Amino acid sequence: MSKRSSIGSWAFTIGPYADHPIDFDTVCTKLKDLGFHGLELGAFPPHPTPGNPNGPNDTWAGAMPERTQRAELKAQMAERGLGFSGIAANLWGEKLINTDDQSKYIAEFKTSSDFAKDVGIAGIRIDTVQPPTIHREVPYDVALHRVVDTWQTCCDIAADNGQTVTWEFEPGFAFNKPSDVVRIHDAVNKPNFGILYDTCHGQMVGVIGARQEDGKEVFENQIEFIHLLNGRINHIHLIDSDTKCHKDANGEDETSAHPPFGLGILDFDAIVPELVKAARLPHDWWTVDLCFWPDAWTATASCKTVLDDLIRKYGN
C-alpha cells in the first residue's frame, strides 16, 4: 500500500504566521484540494487544542475541552475525507530539564493524549522543550535522567490510549547530538517510543552540528546518521535543508529553517531509500514540515508535488 501524505499544520500558526494564522477550516480545504490525505495537527491556537490553558473562562481560539466538541471535529475530518497523521502536543510552556518536578509536564501530556484519543490521533510528537544551552546549567546525567523518567511515564499514558510517542530531535532543543538521540531512545526503552526523523533536522544535527554544546558530533552525510538510528525511527518528516537555522527574534540561530523542496541541498533520491530501510513505522504516513518557513502557505502546493513523486518512487 502506498504511503499517505500529510503536512504539519503548525507551519500556518506559529513563527512567521503567529500574527496572522490561517484558520483550520481554510487549511483543511486547501489540503483536500491539493490531494493531501490528511494533516499533522499542531495543537496551537487557533487550530484545535485540548482546552483552555487558564481555566474555563479563558478565551482560547480552537479550544475543545468537551468530548462533544472533539467528536464533532472527528466527524468533520471524516466528512472531509482527511485523516490525522499525528499531533504535536503543546508542551513548550512546561519545564522538563531544569526542575525536579515534571508533574505539570506529565499532566499536560496526558491532556494532549486524551484529546488525541478522542479525535482519533494515534501518534504524539514531543521534544525536550528547552534549548541546548540548558546543558550549561544542569549536569548531563541529571538532565538525561529527568528526560528519560518523564518520557517513560508519558509512554505509559500514551500506551493506555493506544498511541505511539515520537521524539523530534532538533538543533534548537537539548540533547541534539547523534549519540544523545540513541542514548535517550534506548534508555526510554518503551515499545511505543521512537524517533521522529525530519530530513532537515537530520542534516542540521547529524551533518552540520548546529547549536551543539561542548564540541560538535557529526557525520559526513545523513546516510551514516540514518544507519545509526536503524530500527529506532517511528515517524518521518520530509523537507529540504539549506544548512541554515531559522533565526529567533534577536537574530540568533534557533532551529532548522525547513526550506521547501528544491531550495536546499538534500539528495532525496539518496536519503529516502535509506530512511525507508531504517524506519519501523507503525503507520503509513509521510509528512511535509514547513515549520518557520515565511511563505509556507504558497510553498505547500509545490511540496505536495515533490512528496507525491517521492511516494511514487519509494513509498510502496
Image (cartoon, rainbow, N blue to C red):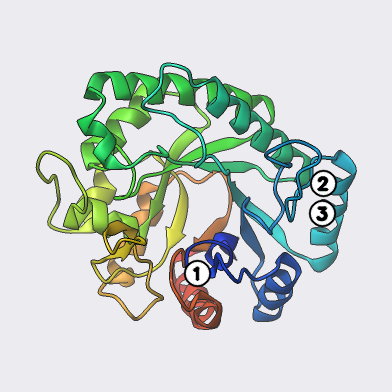
Please tell me which residue is depicted at 48% across the width and 63% down the height of the picture: 15
Give whichever of discs 1 and 3 has the lower sequence position: 3
Label 2: few (<14), some (14–19) or many (≥20) C-alpha neighbours in 10 Å: many
Asked if the residues shown at circle 1 and circle 3 are in contact, with their CB atoms under 8 angstroms apart, the answer is no
Residue at x-position 11% and y-position 38%: 214
Q: Is mark 3 on a helix, strand or loop?
A: helix
Q: Which of 62 and 42 is in front in this view?
A: 62
- Asked if residue 78 is positioned above or below residue 97 in the image, the reply reads below
Residue at x 68%, y 71% (from the top left corner): 27
Decide: is 231 above or below 251.
above
Mark 2 → mark 1, Cα distance in angstroms:
31 Å
Mark 3 surroundings within 10 Å by alpha-carbon count, few (fewer than 14), some (14 through 19), many (20 or more): some
Callout 1 amino acid: Ile
> How far across and down, in percent of the image, does residue 277 sit?
37, 52
**Cα–Cα span, label 3 and label 2:** 5 Å
Dot 1: what SS?
helix
Q: Residue 70 got which mark?
A: 2
Q: How far apart are marks 1 and 3 (CA)?
A: 28 Å
Q: Earlier in the sequence, mark 2 or mark 1?
A: 2
Which mark is nearer the camera, 1 or 3? 3
Which residue in the structure is indicated by mark 1?
311
| Amino acid type for the residue under numbered disc 3 | Leu
Q: In which quarter of the image is the N terminus?
A: bottom right
Horizontal side, residue 104 vs residue 98: left or right: right
Q: Which mark is residue 73?
A: 3
- Residue 49 point in image, percent of width and height: 70, 48
Q: As shown in the figure, which amino acid type bears the numbered disc 2?
A: Arg
Foreground pick, 184 / 49:
49
